[in-house]
Amino acid sequence: MKTAKKQPFFFQLVSITASATAIVAAMIIARSDWAADGAAGEKSTADQSVTQNDIKDKAAPEKQASSGGIQSAADRNIAAGPFQPTWESLEQNYHCPDWFRDAKFGIWAHWTAQCVPERGDWYARKMYLPGDPDYKDHLQRYGHPSEFGFKDIDNLWHAENWDPEKLMQLYKAAGAKYFVALANHHDNFDCYDSKYHDWNSVRVGPHKDIVGTWAKVARENGLRFGVSNHSAHAWHWFQVAYGYDPDGPMAGVRYDGFLTKADGKGKWWEGLDPQELYTGQNMVLPAGLTTAQEVNAWHEQNDRKWTEEPPPDNPGFVNSWFLRCQDLIDKYHPDLIYFDDTELPLGQTGLDITAHYYNANSAWHGGNLEAVLTAKKLQPAHRAAVVEDYERGFSDTIQPEPWQTCSCIGQWHYNRTLFEHHSYKNVGQVLRMLVDIVSKNGNLLLSIPVRGDGTIDDDEVAFLHGMADWMAINGEGIFGSRPWKVFGEGPTQISGGMFNEGKVKYTAADLRFTTKDGALYVFALGVPTDDIAVKALGRSSATTQPVSKIKLLGSDAPITWDQADDALTIHKPNQFSSQDVVAFKIDFQ
């Protein structure tokens, strides 16, 4: 069942058709009614319930604050340059910069207040879903979501033990050539000194410019710097904050999504408007549902649906999103922007911000485009316009355009249980992914989850040290390399696409190839127990070349081989210099 769309509580970025005094007065009156309805302990369940007509009546005054529509490209201050906000212009003018093609490996801090509870992904949504384990945990640890919502979790994020320089040195040693900081997630909180959004990490929580600090430290360590922006989905993803318990002692009491700026008087969030954080009433759970199953089914069928379309009745959100993202770009000059979106976010607005970013980036670099912008599930024609990202997935072939896989050693947001059970991906798993991806013209962006206090755990530190050990020996076959004539060979078949990384089990017979400076690098995705047969270099193979020298990376021991019609056979050395994945360098005559 769908409720009718409501005009949202929204704020500064669209024209006002009624006087500001009248609007504020209406909001205060409306909120006072909600406060009366929510005096829970002394009322019966029936008295606490909110009807659908109540929602309509209380939303009506705020409709005046959202008149006007989504701004056009002509109305936006898009940087001048060759890129116009159309797919055709982006396709014709974009080329992926060499720095990204050379880098191959980046590390990501997917770090927000959702890491504070240490329960993993999507806490800011699941804490509002009755019956969900995160809802139950939140109720026990923090209180009812009508009184202690995610805005209050934002305020608990202090980053008090964060040492970005120490972390960056670990990331760099592990082989990262670029670093990506999360700028905002679906929880709609900006982790930077945001000019257009009061719910940001300088004003709330850490009271630090998280993105600005990461950018400074990454660049001082010689890494390219990127940001990830996930907030285009906040308008539907965060509508759970407008829900309620369907049963129990707080049945019908709406969660803190209905709080307004006036309710903050005398509280820690005085002067802040929860409607700006929770995005307004775009898709409100209808009153009258009586079971958690009904509530969660409604959310799944309505606000959980993934869409890149702008909210139909909330132009203020879209206009604000553009300004916030433009501010992020202009303030921090990122080398890379990661959009957590299918194609581009929010319709035409996504094209507008991409054109602005490409033109601005070119201007920063004297007319040379150094920008990378990633998006997901691209139409084939659009792969020339942006870099395609495969979330937790693979390609099954060499891609003609550079691409990226994003993955994580655990969950995106910190989950203490994974650490306690020692359940992260191990170094070998990640290395096999990396080599496969690089052999097909891709990069790997790997998230290392960060605790709310800004630290990483002992298993993560050990993982990074393991990556550093391998990179010190084998990195020459990764960094600055390009795909060879074929990506590799071996028994393991891989399906291309997203969310399939757990289905792939490599063996030592699976080989992957890269090339650099005329040499071929052959990676065995396991430690061989016998001689290595490279069929692609058999004398009768269409891809063969006569071999002059073979070297095991990390070893000075001589390597012997035979090049027959069916295969090049590399005789197994007595000892390998690396665990998990081993690499040979082959020079040709």
Image (cartoon, helix red, strand yellow):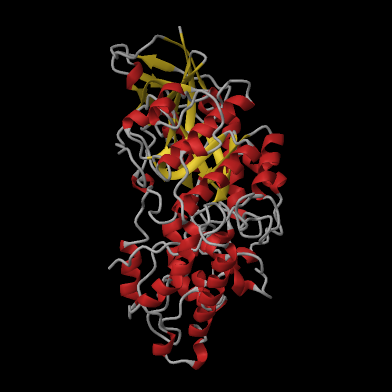
- Say which residue appears at 57% left-offset and 47% top-offset: 324
The relative height of residue 484 versus residue 73 in the rendered view (above or below) is above
Q: Nearer the viewer, residue 274 or 528?
A: 274
Percent of width and height locating residue 315? 45, 52
Q: At 59% from the left edge and 39% from the top edge, which residue is drawn? A: 329
- Residue 325 in the image: state x and y as whole percent: 55, 44
Residue 387 pos. (x, y %): 44, 32
Going by the image, does 58 lie left or right of 271?
Answer: left
> Vertically, is 336 above or below 369?
below
Q: Residue at x 36, y 35 (%)?
A: 395
The image shows residue 27, relative to residue 93, as above or below, that is below
Left or right of residue 196: residue 537? left
- Compared with 493, 196 (above or below) is below
The quarter of the image holding the C terminus is top left
Front residue of 163/570: it is 163
Residue shown at 48% from the left, 68% from the top: 61
Horizontal arrangement in the rendering, residue 519 relative to residue 283 (left or right): right
- Viewer-closest of 499 and 225: 225
Quadrant for the N terminus in the image: bottom left
Q: Quadrant of residue 473?
A: top right
Residue 421 shows in the view:
no
Count of numbered badges drawn on the protein: 0
Towards the viewer: 523 or 55: 55
Provide residue 334's location: percent of width, then percent of height: 60, 36
| Residue 235 falls in image quadrant | bottom left
Q: Quick check: can you spot residue 88?
A: yes
